[in-house]
Amino acid sequence: MTCYAIGDIQGCYDPLQRLLDKIQFDPSQDQLWFAGDLINRGPKSLETLRFIKLLGDSARSVLGNHECHFLATAFGQKKSHRSDTFSDILDADDAEELIQWVRALPFFYEDTVLGYCMIHAGLPPQWSIEDTREHAKELTQHIQSNQAEEFFAAMYGNQPDMWQEDLTGNDRLRFIINCFTRMRYCDEHGRLNLKEKGELGTQASGLIPWYDAPNRQTSEQKIVFGHWSTLGFQQQHNATCLDTGCLWGGSLSALALDGTERLISIDCERSANPF
């Protein structure tokens, strides 16, 4: 079996199929890891979601910020943006089944045999791998509970921007979800900056990519992540970014998690509706 980790698809179903043809993916033998943002802004969110769901145990996915926004919209706690392209999911005959499938996805996935773990965005330097597991579980349990609707209403916002163990309620959950689904830059102490989205070198003074934070407690873990199209493919300190900007006319990439870390990519055309 070969396991491949794939970056942000965002509804670009046709490029995904071309990439799977290129790697000769066999669902009876291989497994795919998807680093979140399966849907939205691209042209075929419904087809993408149905396909990955039907892969069953041949696929592992984590939640990205676009899935969280989709859930908040599905629960009536957020209005769709002009740029959203997931109305086809909400209007589908199997909409409720797909919503619940997305809702059940984790924020963190790991395979201790392969020696890799996966998130969508980033981790604060204070969290160990044990902390990461616990906070992901805490957030998942909340989203799957009857308190989910209340949280989706309070999910948006950039504060608090610094981890403290004594954070409680929606402040605690908001910080956790911002790390797993939105984080790119922080300062050397781990204070989040969620406004900076550009490529390295364009950020404000004092900001560093999350994986460069001094004394990061997960620096010994092999982590694959997405979310950062302006960063592109990047490997630093055991962290590998796989968002190579398919939606924006870049490429869609798969990393073989078989010890070789081969990168396989296909070129993508810019989506007709990326905004």
Image (cartoon, helix red, strand yellow):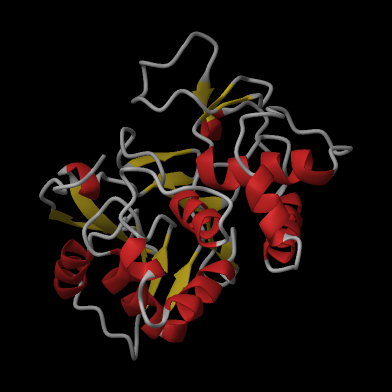
Q: Is residue 256 above or below residue 191?
A: below
Q: Is the N terminus in the top left, top right, bottom left or bottom right quadrant?
A: bottom left
Does residue 64 appear anywhere in the picture? Answer: yes
Q: Position of residue 202 (x, y in %)?
A: 36, 16
Q: Is residue 273 left or right of residue 51?
A: left
Q: Position of residue 39 (x, y in %)?
A: 36, 59
Q: How many marks?
A: 0
Q: Position of residue 111 (x, y in %)?
A: 56, 69
Q: Position of residue 192 (x, y in %)?
A: 61, 27
Q: Is residue 128 left or right of residue 48?
A: right
Q: Is residue 274 left or right of residue 92?
A: left
Q: Is residue 203 above or below residue 59?
A: above
Q: Is the C terminus in the top left, top right, bottom left or bottom right quadrant?
A: top left
**For this rendering, which residue is in front, 50 or 120?**
50
| Residue at position x 19%, y 71% in the image | 17
Res. 138 image quadrant: bottom right
| Residue at position x 51%, y 22% in the image | 208
User: Going by the picture, which residue comes out furthest to the right?
Assistant: 166
Does residue 219 appear anywhere in the picture? Answer: no
**For this rendering, which residue is in front, 45 or 30?**
45
Res. 163 image quadrant: top right
Q: Is residue 115 above or below residue 104?
A: above
